[in-house]
Image (spheres, rainbow, N blue to C red):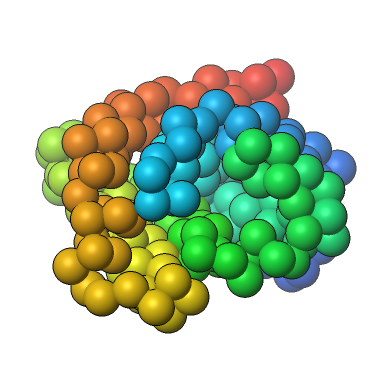
Amino acid sequence: MTKEKNYSNNELTKGKLTTIDICQIAAFAAIMAVLAQISIPMPSGVPMTLQTLIVPLAGIVIGRKKGTIATLLYLLMGAVGIPVFASFQGGLGILLGMTGGFLISFPILSYTAGLGHKLGVKMRTSSSKPALYYVTVVAALILGAVINYAFGTVWFMIIAKADLAYSLAACVIPFIPTSIIKIAIVAIVGPELKKRLDKVLVH
């Protein structure tokens, strides 16, 4: 690990963000806002977007702490009225609406992905088995997705006053195939993007 990388992580641990940290956080928050607009409206009112691809990716590429902060920044921008949510919507009403549970649990999705990456690196280093890294990361991504679905579905049930069967049909079942694809993409692409980013920062 380079001195530059150590410095950045130590500063973040102390609660201080470097200029590079802030740029990374802002960049990923902006990407989340852009990808939120690439959405497919669903009959239930829960859109299918690319946000659940970039949110865990942020946790791996820039780390679980900065990834979580980037996600919180994105939610804050939306809460104050900036149209960064799907279909160029913004405002506290969106967070308190039927899809609010999914949005509010995004930071958990980012954090678990970043944590999975960190644990995976440790396991790969200690055992010299690269496969353990991917198993750990995929497990963390699945855990994050389950938490996101659970929180979002329960929230949907409360706001929409819907039963469990309808809520699962509206919030979970149609999204499972794309979630599997996203998990595979994040697990494969995330580590490579992190390596490239680290090389750029070193040089």
Q: Quadrant of residue 131?
A: top left
Judge whether residue 164 can be spotted in this image: yes
131 above or below 112? Answer: above
- At 66% across and 30% down in the image, what residue appears? 34
Task: Locate residue 157 relative to residue 27 in the image: left or right.
Answer: left
Which quarter of the rendered picture does the C terminus lie within? top right
Image coordinates for residue 105, horizontal then vertical, percent: 49, 65
Q: Quadrant of residue 172?
A: bottom left
Image coordinates for residue 137, horizontal then vertical, percent: 28, 47
Judge whether residue 194 can be spotted in this image: no
Figure disc tally: 0
Task: Locate residue 115 relative to residue 126 in the image: left or right.
Answer: right
191 above or below 200? Answer: below
- At 77% across and 59% down in the image, what residue appears? 91
Task: Locate residue 105 relative to residue 10 in the image: left or right.
Answer: left
- At 74% across and 66% down in the image, what residue appears? 92
Image coordinates for residue 101, horizontal then vertical, percent: 49, 67
- At 35% across and 67% down in the image, what residue appears? 153
